[in-house]
Amino acid sequence: QVQLVESGGGLVQPGGSLRLSCAASGSIFSINDMGWYRQAPGKQRELVAITTSSGSTNYADSVKGRFAISRDNAKNTVDLQMNSLKPEDTAVYYCNARITSRDYITLNYWGRGTQVTVSS
């Protein structure tokens, strides 16, 4: 069993900051890409940021320069530092990871999501 658990969402004023964290646990052999996606009401889920096992990163244009993704391979965690938040960043944020389990099955895993609301 493998699971992803997110934390750190909440309500913040425009211009504020939040840090999301995601921890992978269970029967893990290796983790490839780890990333964050978000889904706003009435919209499709979209990629926010992703990082590979070697540390390279990619961001959605809408968050470049404001968000930073980081991972700790020893702890199987990935964080998303969100600065200069805007109301349009309001969404449910989901952690995603491509994980190979100890029985060598590779699957794409999702967390349950954490709500981020940017409002005055």
Image (tube, helix red, strand yellow):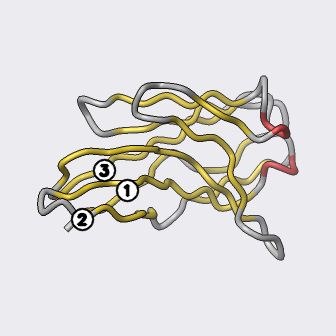
Binning the other alpha carbons within 10 Å of mark 3 as few (below 14), some (14 to 19) or many (20 upward) gives many
Binning the other alpha carbons within 10 Å of mark 1 as few (below 14), some (14 to 19) or many (20 upward) gives some
Q: At which x and y percent is residue 36? A: 58, 48
Looking at the rendered structure, the secondary structure element under dot 3 is strand
Q: Is residue 19 above or below residue 38?
A: above
Image quadrant in which the N terminus is located: bottom left
The three-letter code of the residue at mark 3 reads Ala
* In this view, the mark in front (3 or 1): 3
- Residue on which disc 2 sits: 105
Judge from the rendering whether residue 14 lies leftward or rightward of residue 7; answer left or right.
right
Binning the other alpha carbons within 10 Å of mark 2 as few (below 14), some (14 to 19) or many (20 upward) gives few
The three-letter code of the residue at mark 1 reads Val
**Residue 19 figure quarter:** top right
Mark 3 or 1, nearer chain start: 1
- Residue on which disc 1 sits: 5
Per the model, the C-alpha gap separating discs 3 and 1 is: 7 Å
Per the model, the C-alpha gap separating discs 1 and 2 is: 20 Å
Judge from the rendering whether residue 95 lies leftward or rightward of residue 38; answer left or right.
left
Residue name at image x 42 percent, y 63 percent: 108
Looking at the rendered structure, the secondary structure element under dot 1 is strand
Mark 1 or 2, nearer chain start: 1
Residue name at image x 80 percent, y 29 percent: 84
* In this view, the mark in front (1 or 2): 2
- Residue on which disc 3 sits: 24
Residue name at image x 42 percent, y 30 percent: 71
